[in-house]
Amino acid sequence: MSTYYLTTPIFYVNGSPHIGHAYTAVAADVIARFRRLQGVDTYFLSGTDEHGQKVEKAAAEAGLAPRAFTDAVSGQFRAMLAMLDVSNDDFIRTTEPRHKAGATALWQKLAASGDIYPGHYEGWYAVRDEDFYTEADLTTLADGTRLAPTGAPVEWVREPNYLFRLSAYADRLLAHYEAHPEFVGPAGKRNEMLSFIRGGLRDLSVSRSSFRWGIPVPGDPDQVMYVWLDALANYITALGYPDQTGPLWRFWPADLHLVGKDIQRFHAIYWPAFLMAAGLPVPRRIFAHGWWTRDGAKMSKSLGNVVDPFDLVTKYGVDATRFFLLREVPFGNDGDFSHRALVGRLNTDLANGIGNLAQRTLSLVAKNCEGRLPDAGPRQPADTALLELADALPTVLAGAFERQALHEALDEVWRLVRAADSYIDQMAPWSLRRTDVARMGHVLRVLAEAIRVAAVVLQPFMPASMGRLLDQLGVSADARDLAALQAPLPDGIVLPAPQGVFPRWVEDAGASR
Ligand code: MSP
């Protein structure tokens, strides 16, 4: 059986979860759920990144010991995942003994191969990004403040520490990019990574000695590991590294690291170099999604305009939130969050789209067919056209998922929804009731089959609501994967009374039920 291992980035616990974190997590969840629907043996990892100066500083500002602080914030991320219906198989914390042991073993391996050596670092560092910068990267404000390209303030760091021989891996990385054009996506990001490598790789400082909140460097109690080396290791420590004989190791190398565009370089350059140095296979693909702004502005704590995922779910519901995040913006591009845009999607695509289609069809079945699913009849060309569109959907979606084109997958489903809408209008089963009852039944059956396909393939995006819709279509819980679509719905089954799946949003009243 084929395997599929995918990961979210592990979240920094310096502050509460926001929409950006929810986005990465929901997108990864949709991909994991689609693989499971395909019958693939899937492993899906998320977790929290708890060490480093940024987190130590946030704990101090909160007046808490780092451990107590990270326990609390890590709990918030776990709660966010549960609230969003994210189906991760494991949640790793970098403060756990299993992770510390694995990261220590990785360090020892790199040291043993001669790829980590003692030296010192002198240069600019941005705590907010946990990243090093050169003079040429910086801009200087009128008051003399120096800023990284990300807008993060930088400080001058000068300390003895350990370096990783990144420079020695440039050629191997380039060869890998060459041999595996799919290694980094989207394509624009791949080019960016390639020019970074071609611009010359300098050895990377992989330890810090000016603070304590980190994993101690083996054999040197004055140093802690650089937080990115510590953090990246989570992808293998969660599978049991250094033990390569355990039950989870079969998932390595990862099939997909899903990341935001800001952290692509760590994943697409440093991480594969660390793995090559450790003699391990590198991940198959690293895909970067874009960033969300709010009402056109960058979100930040200081502007007070951060979108809180807990608020979104309370207000709009889990599935509308999940759907909006993936429908609104081509995956890989930046997007803008606004209440208007979300309500537009909720009403147009969900309430008036698939929700209304299902409600119209199922209430006609309830009223005119004694609540029983009508038998399939002789097919007319319009029936065949609609069913062909539906039957092709799983394969079309599989192709889109292969490229993480989640928006394309949704576009394709909505092509079917629109086609089914035109079909029901043209066939007018409500009039057939008076003229040709048998044909009315056949038309409703075609619609039920088409809606079933849409609901099955939409489960990864909106698990709970599509589950309810499949209940109403009489699809048993064990017949909801892609393979089950090969068989038609059973004739004559009694369907439960139809109930609207997506309430329309009415301004001021919220969602009307
Ligand atoms: N701890 C690192 C990742 C280590 S992985 C070995 C980190 N954490 S983070 O909490 O800052 O970010 C987690 C994810 O959220 C990243 O993929 C990041 O791109 C994403 N987002 C954070 N803000 C975002 C937006 N405003 N919009 C979209 N995604 C954003 O980086």
Image (spheres, rainbow, N blue to C red):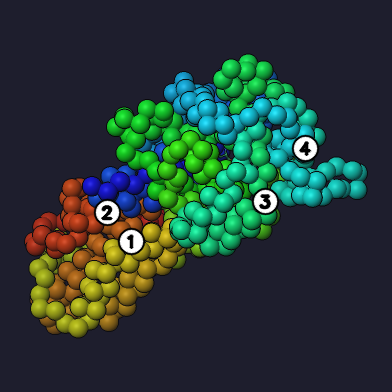
Lower sequence index among marks 2 and 3: 2
What's the distance in space between the residues labelled 1 and 4, CA to CA? 46 Å
Three-letter code for the amino acid on which mark 2 is drawn: Gln
What's the distance in space between the residues labelled 4 and 3, CA to CA? 17 Å
Q: Callout 3: 10 Å neighbours few (<14), some, many (20+)?
A: few
Q: Which mark is residue 200?
A: 3
Among the 4 quarters of the image, the one containing residue 371: bottom left
Q: Nearer the viewer, mark 2 or mark 4?
A: 4
Task: Determine the residue located farthest toward the right in the rendered image.
Answer: 143
Residue highlighted by disc 4 = 123
Q: Is mark 3 within 8 Å of ligand 1?
A: no
Please, what secondary structure does the residue beneath circle 4 have?
strand
What's the distance in space between the residues labelled 2 and 3, CA to CA? 42 Å
Question: Do we see residue 125 in this rendering?
Answer: yes
Q: Callout 2: 10 Å neighbours few (<14), some, many (20+)?
A: some
Q: Which mark is residue 398?
A: 1
Q: Position of residue 216 (x, y in %)?
A: 59, 20
Tag 1–tag 2 contact (CB < 8 Å): yes
Tag 1–tag 4 contact (CB < 8 Å): no
Tag 2–tag 3 contact (CB < 8 Å): no
Q: Is residue 151 left or right of residue 195?
A: right
Three-letter code for the amino acid on which mark 4 is drawn: Gly
Q: Position of residue 38 (x, y in %)?
A: 27, 53
Q: Nearer the viewer, mark 2 or mark 3?
A: 3
Using the image, determine if residue 15 lies above or below residue 330: above
Lower sequence index among marks 4 and 3: 4
What's the distance in space between the residues labelled 2 and 4, CA to CA? 49 Å
Using the image, determine if residue 430 lies above or below residue 477: below
Please, what secondary structure does the residue beneath circle 2 have?
loop
Q: Nearer the viewer, mark 4 or mark 3?
A: 3
* Residue shown at 51% from the left, 44% from the top: 272
